[in-house]
Image (spheres, rainbow, N blue to C red):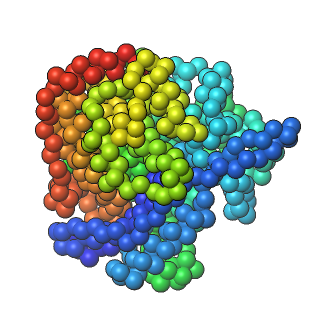
Amino acid sequence: MSGKKLFAVDFGASGGKCFAGIFEGKSFSMREVHRFAHEGTSFFVPETRGKVTERSHWDDILLFRNIVLGLQAYRRDVSDKLDSIGLDTWGADGQFINQNGEMLGKIYCYRDHRLDNMTDVVKRKIDAKRMYEITGIHFQPFNLSNQLHWFVKNRRDLLRSAKVYLPVPAVFNYYLCGSTAVDSSWASVTQLMDAKKKQWSREILKKLDIPARVMPAIVDPGAVLGKLHKQLADAAGINCAKVIAAASHDTASAFAAAPVRHADEALIISSGTWSLVGKLIPEPITNGAAMAANMSNEGGIGNTRFLKNCMGSWLVQELRRIWRIADGKEMDWSELDKLTKSASALTAFIDPDDKSFYNPANMETAIKDFCRKTGQTVPANRGSLLRVVYESLALKYRRINEQICSVCGNETKVVHIVGGGSKNIMLNQFVADALGLPVVAGPEEGTAVGNLMVQAMGLGIIKSMKEALPIIRQAFPVKDYKPRDAGPWDKAYEQFRKIAK
């Protein structure tokens, strides 16, 4: 390993970051060069019958502009030489382009209300058991199966002009180098890819009336997609670096960065806006038990991520947003932590995945209504609301761990938390206490770390992700949490089981 410089773009659902990764001799280092916040925007649009409908969209222009700003910062702070660029994003959304490379509309946010009932519509088109057998993906409103079926039902006039559908990471790779391909880690979460063949399922596409001609090529993580457009490279002041298909679903990159020693004993939680809770397994499990537990089999890097999507910091982000509107100013995260610590412990619980929390107008109202409906103490202040959320998340992780272990047939002995949530000292301790297991927190920027390691594979710096793990352990310190008194948490879990799935 000598003198290689890599650039990772990590787009989450509430912010974006750009990192430089440098392999020099036998050492590896990573530094952040650019960071920004973003969020979806709601529009209120009169449709054909005059009904005003809320539509939520991402700002792809803002996102791409920040890639360019990141590349310019890289040139200023690191070098004008770059070996590769890799990009990862959240695991939903996209848009069609026409023959001239023009987008056929804005990019919808995955929480857009047009998808509220689409799961039921899709299930009427194809047997749910058969769909799970093929894809290994459980039913979620935001699945691309729902999104594309909605499009062919409601925007068929635009479909005639469509050349290819670009998933979100492919949108930006297309802007960077002209590639329309998507890697298998991202394609796997769409509920349209055959989990065993790693190809789009013709059977599902036909059932959902989605033309096979519009689906992008699927490539392996680490594949070279092309080179940075010269005009763009010149604008950024760098060379035409290779654009590599990272594990572009951010969860795939995050799981790849977890410094796991024994995969069958480790529960991994990618903690951010969503919590992705699961294990790395050799092959997909698509039997009845896995389907009944609503487990998903997502494509990894030489393995499968057997996991469940659970709500994450979205709940707190929405509380913070509501309070910003009420106060006219943003509360610091440190202030939120103080409020949480001062609140009484284990007084009430919510099911973080209850549909009332998916996209409510007011998260505080939604949480209080849930507690009232389930006969629990209603949180009286902001600290109590936050404590209810964090404790409920920890208990939800315990529930999911039980389900995963039951289906996989092996016991969890350690929990790895990666991503932004690994910074949350209080939540990490709650997880250790709730599960009665040691927690290893870090790397904090696990998604970017995994992104860079997949690029390193694509460049031949390392041969496999197995070679990446000692590099990750050496470069990024982790923090250990030991479980404390289990009694109160065991009692709380009994109550939690009564109100949560």
Quadrant location of residue 19?
bottom left
Give the camera-side residue of 418 and 152: 418
Give the camera-side residue of 207 and 407: 407
Q: Is residue 23 above or below residue 43?
A: below
The location of residue 21, given as percent across then percent down, is 31, 68
Residue at 59 percent of width and 47 percent of height:
109
The location of residue 1, given as percent across then percent down, is 22, 69
Q: Does the image show residue 500?
A: yes
The location of residue 422, given as percent across then percent down, is 28, 48
Q: Does the image show residue 200?
A: no
Looking at this view, name the residue that lies furthest to the right: 49
**78 horizontally vs 216: left or right:** left
Residue at 70 percent of width and 43 percent of height:
54
Quadrant location of residue 284?
top left
Q: Is residue 396 above or below residue 129?
A: below
Q: Is residue 382 above or below residue 253?
A: above
Q: How many marks?
A: 0
Give the camera-side residue of 501 and 18: 501
Task: Quarter of the image for the C terminus: give it.
Answer: top left
Residue at 64 percent of width and 28 percent of height:
117
The location of residue 36, given as percent across then percent down, is 46, 64
Residue at 25 percent of width and 54 percent of height:
443
**109 horizontally vs 249: left or right:** right
**95 horizontally vs 235: left or right:** right
Give the camera-side residue of 472 and 60: 60
